[in-house]
Amino acid sequence: MSTAPDVATHVPAPAAPTRAADPARRTVEADPAHPAVGAATALLADYAPGARFLGTPTRTLLGQGVHSEVPHDERPLAARVADTLAAAREAGADAPVVIGAVPFDQGAPAALAVPVALHTAPPLAADPLVALPAQAPAAADWRIRQVPAPEHYGAAVGAAVDRMWRGEFSKVVLARTLELDTPDSAEPVDIAAMLQRLARRDPTGYTFALPTGPERTLIGASPELLVSRRGRQVVANPLAGSIPRSDDLAEDVRRAAALLRSSKDLHEHAVVVDAVHQALAPYCADMTVPAAPTLIRTAAMWHLSTTVTGTLARPGTSALELACALHPTPAVCGTPTDTAREVIRESEPFDRGFFTGMVGWGDASGDGEWVVTIRCAEAERNSLRLYAGAGVVAASEPAAETAETAAKFRTFLAAVGAEL
């Protein structure tokens, strides 16, 4: 990566999974050198609630139907997924792939399934048609409730900072939500249109729409790769330390430069990179960790970013196994992890559910991509719950962290035509 604008996480594109011949399947093999114009945006247009859509910098996936679901039991998640994929292959599926979401609490049920039909295309960013504007949001009378209220969130940040100065812990990520509904409308949320707007606004990131329950969809556009695996090559891209962007170009450049010099944000970022390094080291024969971060830009934020790479010591270790070893990183939880979890439980008046969990795909060979579930919302009928969090350290200021979460909400508010 570089400090050039609109540079997101990019890893080498693995070959698209091989699928059984099926006349109902529309398959476009990922070929970055000769991308099929319109292939990725066609899959985006084909999405309908209940399907599983995932767009990454290496591919675009659309899964339809459910061949088999990953069960919830006492076995480790990676083992359950591996057994589900093996059973699907024994049942006749050729190179099955699992797609879905894992909650913040790994002990809670995941929403992972092997689709009946899997359609693939090159990444959205390689499709020139993604530059075409999405239809503007339809007028809606959104009712917005902030949970907790901004003053209560700021008070929680202040209380956490006080405890850090007393030496109880060194970092915690505190989140808040926006509850949106249209009480006078019987029409459900237009998830497909929302997905179009999110994907076209940040096509270089990770865009997803995945079912997480009856009539419930997790939808978002995350900038952060947790981990990917292609063969024995491993890539992680922790993001920590961020600042809202400005509509004024000169001011936006100044903000980006200031982020690269911010001792508070550089320290926060270094803690996360070190945690990722330590978590992956037991699985890798070698690793490369850059000495200093670079910048990544989304439509609403600048982030400090470091791309960590490694080579697996054991080729049988799956991408999901690595993701479970990393999750939750200090970028979404805090340090030490157990203390940060307790502070989160005490401070947040809601269950995070799938927010700050992970979404992604994996195949039977162990290859896959798993992304941190941020910049997301859960849609259910005519309501939305939006999530945003900020990393709180001893140098944090309540007003600044509250403003950061407000800026992160902008991604979704723009997609639904609402303002905070």
Image: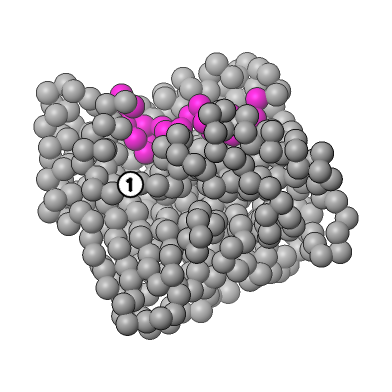
- Specify start and end residues of the magenta stretch as a single range: 317-337
Tell me if 118 is positioned left or right of 320 in this view. right
- Residue 330 lies in magenta, yes or no? yes
| Residue toward you, 32 or 211 | 211
Pointer 1 local density, CA inside 10 Å: few below 14, some 14–19, many at least 20: few
Q: Quadrant of the C terminus?
A: bottom left
Residue 207 visible (yes or no) = no
Tell me if 186 is positioned left or right of 321 in this view. left
Q: Residue at x 59, y 19 (%)?
A: 283
Picture coordinates of residue 157 (x, y %)? Answer: 17, 42
Q: Residue at x 21, y 38 (%)?
A: 346
Picture coordinates of residue 395 (x, y %)? Answer: 18, 35
Q: Is residue 97 above or below residue 138?
A: above
> Badge 1 is on which residue?
351
Tell me if 146 is positioned left or right of 185 in this view. left
Q: Residue at x 60, y 31 (%)?
A: 78
